[in-house]
Amino acid sequence: MTESTTSVPRRGVPLWVQIIVWISLLGLLVIVAVELNRSQQGQVGPGAKISNFSMPLFSGYNWNGQSQIHLSDFRGKVVMVNFWASWCKPCEQEADDLEQAWQFYKNDGRVVFIGADYVDTEPEARAYLAKFGITFANGPDLGTSVSQLFRIKGVPETYFIDQQGVLQYAQIGPFSSVDEIKSIINPMLK
Amino acid sequence: MKRLFWVSILIFIIASFFTSIALAQQPAPTPSDDQVNQIAHQLYCPVCANTPLDVCPTDACRQWRDLIRQQLAQGWTEDQIKQYFVEQYGVRVLAEPPETGINWLIYILPPAIILAGAFILFRALRMWTKPISASAVSGSNEDAFKDEYVARLEEELKKRK
């Protein structure tokens, strides 16, 4: 008799297992893509609407007696948000200029300066503020929530928000003079 | 004798009282570097990329280690200190991500992928090394022969009817 070639039945992976594996792989790819996209985003740029945020303030550096500020409270005003840290040497270069600019605008009523202390310790932060005679509202960026909102890459970085809550200018690095600060704010007041 | 016993007890009580006062007035011992670094090792420098807080050389990191030392001296627990750092600097300061939300994937996926890979490798090795058994071949041929035999038998029976 002749031998017949009968094929052995193939035992493959069940269909439901294959579906689960492919869906899981696809889900992982989506997560990786989203995170990669987010990590490659730069700082918030001019024209972007800034979401409302809240920030506590150091005692002694309150705003109108309030120990916490909300960006929405300043609608109708020009807001300057300055990210700094006591361990940041370039921040020291602009500290005097920022305070002088604040002294120039504080009685105007149309401009608000906010300092956000980035990943710092309070005693050192207070020493820094006292050293440079800073008087405008300052507080810790707890959990780096505010700095993440602006997607900062380091300090110092300063953001200027107009009366409608739209970012108009982002300064990466320290200012070189008080006039530089005024040249940014004055056009926003017109 | 009885009087001597009660006098001894009284002296002991008074001595214990003053000893406890003396101990209470002693300053709390300063936490050692090892105690500080045991916690700092579980935290990452919020500024320097991928640098544990216990080995970070910057001034900022030294300040944070000093802060841990102060908190330990005040009686804070390890969990309280870590929680403080999370509130101040965000979850990313932890060396181990918290087991919440999507972070569970970090703990589940690697072992699952390793297990799946091991299973696939095991199946592949079995297929490569398992010899083709003679009985399997002859068995299939035997079945075919039986079918052919039955078919021929039925054909012969029909002819004889």
Image: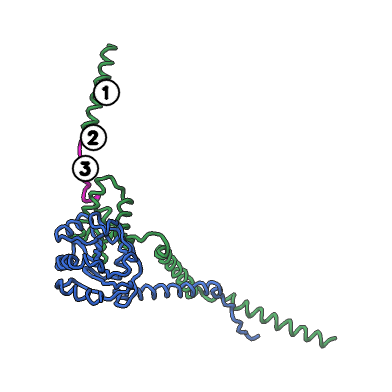
Chain colours: A blue, B green
Q: Which residues are magenta?
A: B25-35
Query: Magenta stretch: residue B107 in it?
Result: no
Residue B43's x, y, as percent?
28, 58
- Left or right of B85? Residue A180 is left
Q: Nearer the viewer, mark 2 or mark 3?
A: 2
Residue B11's x, y, as percent?
24, 20
Question: Which residue corresponds to the image point at 31% horizontal and 72% vertical from the top-left?
Answer: A163
Q: Quadrant of the N terminus of chain A?
A: bottom right
Question: Which residue corresponds to the image point at 25% horizontal and 74% vertical from the top-left?
Answer: A189
Q: CA distance from mark 2 to mark 3?
A: 12 Å
Quarter-of-image position of residue B51 = bottom left
Tag 1: residue type? Ile
The chain that hosts pointer 3 is B
The chain that hosts pointer 2 is B
Residue A57's x, y, as percent?
27, 58
Question: Which residue corresponds to the image point at 51% horizontal and 72% vertical from the top-left?
Answer: A20
Residue holding disc 2: B24
Asked if one can make out residue B62 in the rendered structure from this viewpoint, the answer is no
Quarter-of-image position of residue B160 = bottom right
Residue holding disc 1: B13
